Amino acid sequence: MPQELFFQAGKYSRSNAKEMDNLRRGLIWMASMCLLISGLCAQSVAAHPHSWIDMKADMILDEQGQLIAIRQHWVFDTYFSMVTLADAINEHGDKETGLSKMADQMIRNLTRYRYFSVLTIDGTEIELPRPSSYELTENTRKEQPILELEMRFDINRPAVIRNKNLIWSVFDPTYYIAMNYWTAENVSIKGESGAQCQLNLDSPSPSFELIEYAQNLDRTRKDTDGLGVNFAEKIQITC
């Protein structure tokens, strides 16, 4: 696909992103099952990425303005959702049980990838614990079923963020899955002290060579580890 389909003036274009969304649904989607369901990242015949997740996040502060929790909300693409939902029902007999079991499996598999999430405060990385709660649910979008995964991470030790630079980024390191907030409005700061904070979303600006590399990965069978960070959005919060 041409570079301008993804980017405009070095930044993600919302209108172009919508065009990309319409086109990308025609890519082979079956391989998207491999990571979150089976925990494997086998190569496929289509260019990276293979699956798409739209995201929202809440940064939760206590009365002292310390970061105490992060709530993530992931919305999976239609095709991944349809196949996963059907598989959950076929394997476990009913939707409620199936989604619960699938959620358990997703969390187990994501643990080894640190939940695709990187949190740093003044350059020091804060490790996320296992989610204190999580849930996989079914919803609808354009009359099609979609799956949504919500996870809450309680920070082990409340983190002081006042007068510090907090950076939050969520991405698949291999760029097998594209993960986007698209706009800063999809990230919020919860807590009275949050009104004193400023939040910005920095869109990635990968080179044309990296875009072309991603498009041809499966044909050339090159290692993709480390590619995803080049396509990752960054949320910056200063309080």
Image (cartoon, grey):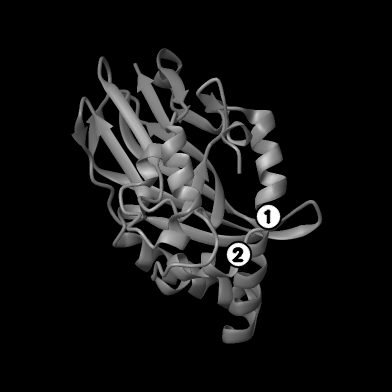
Q: Which residue is mark 2?
A: 29
Where is residue 168, by image quadrant? top left
Task: State how far apart marks 1 and 2 are (Cα).
Answer: 8 Å
Which quarter of the image is occupied by the C terminus?
A: top left
Which quarter of the image is occupied by the N terminus?
A: top right
Return the residue found at the far left: 124
Q: Is residue 148 left or right of residue 35?
A: right
Q: Position of residue 135 (x, y in %)?
A: 51, 60
Secondary element under disc 2, as helix, strand or loop, is: loop
Secondary element under disc 1, as helix, strand or loop, is: loop
- Type of amino acid at the residue the image marks with label 1: Arg
Q: Position of residue 212 (x, y in %)?
A: 48, 43
Q: Which residue is mark 1?
A: 25
Q: Position of residue 45 (x, y in %)?
A: 53, 66
Q: Which is nearer the eye, 34 or 147? A: 34
Badge 2 density bin: few <14, some 14–19, many ≥20, Cα 10 Å = many
Give the mark count: 2
Q: Is residue 199 left or right of residue 140?
A: left
Instruction: Identify which residue is drawn at 44% across, 56% down.
Output: 217
Instruction: Identify which residue is drawn at 20% across, 29% down.
Output: 123
Badge 1 density bin: few <14, some 14–19, many ≥20, Cα 10 Å = some
Q: Is residue 49 visible?
A: yes
Instruction: Identify which residue is drawn at 55% across, 20% down.
Output: 9
Q: Which is nearer the eye, 167 or 164? A: 167
Residue 218 position (above or below residue 238): below
- Type of amino acid at the residue the image marks with label 2: Trp
Instruction: Identify which residue is drawn at 41% across, 70% down.
Output: 42
Residue 79 position (above or below residue 167): below
Residue 189 position (above or below residue 26): above
Say if mark 1 contacts mark 2, CB within 8 Å: yes
